[in-house]
């Protein structure tokens, strides 16, 4: 497996992670970020979420388009990015589900 697939996986992770933060911030809703107190559990302002979402988009861009030779039409590249997005989506669903009425670990 080429080393840059790791960058593509985490590029997909960052891009998927941008969605809830950017959307929550644009709707004016607070949401958990690493900057909240306690980190990941407390709520951050909508402005912090927009900025965190924008950072995630930028990080995803760098990992996809500045590392290796990413080709969106390559099924392997697209699958690796998709797996990164799916991974963070599942981790987030389990983690944030405890705070927002979704499924939580152990249920």
Image (cartoon, grey):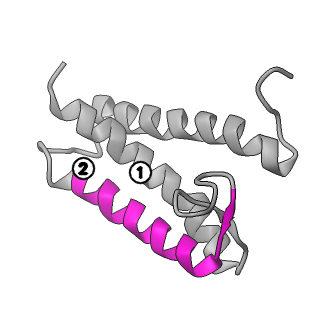
Seen at 53% across and 63% down, the residue is: 35
Which residue corresponds to mark 2?
63
Secondary structure under the numbered disc 2 in the rendered image: helix
37 relative to 71 in the view: left or right = right
Where is residue 33 shown, x and y percent of the image? 57, 59
Q: Determine if the magenta segment contains residue 56.
A: yes
79 relative to 107 in the view: left or right = left
Q: Is residue 61 above or below residue 102?
A: below
Distance Cα–Cα, label 2 vs label 1: 9 Å
Secondary structure under the numbered disc 1 in the rendered image: helix
- Which residue is more in the foreground, 59 or 105? 105
Q: Is residue 36 above or below residue 77?
A: below
Chain part drawn in magenta: 42-63
Residue 14's tag is 1
Question: If the image is split into quadrants, where does the N terminus sit?
Answer: top left
Where is residue 18 shown, x and y percent of the image? 50, 59
Where is residue 107 shown, x and y percent of the image? 86, 22
Asked if disc 2 and disc 1 are in contact, CB closer than 8 Å, the reply is yes
- Quarter holding residue 59: bottom left
72 relative to 53 in the view: left or right = left
């Amino acid at each position: 497996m080429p080393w840059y697939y790791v960058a593509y996986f985490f590029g997909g992770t960052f891009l998927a992670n941008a969605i809830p933060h950017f959307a929550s911030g644009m709707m004016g809703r607070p949401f958990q970020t690493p900057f909240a107190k306690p980190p990941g559990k407390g709520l951050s302002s909508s402005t912090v979420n927009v900025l965190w979402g924008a950072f995630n988009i930028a990080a995803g861009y760098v990992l996809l388009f500045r590392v290796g030779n990413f080709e969106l039409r390559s099924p392997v590249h697209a699958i690796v990015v998709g797996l990164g997005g799916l991974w963070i989506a599942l981790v987030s669903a389990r983690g944030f589900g405890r705070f927002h009425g979704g499924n939580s670990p152990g249920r």
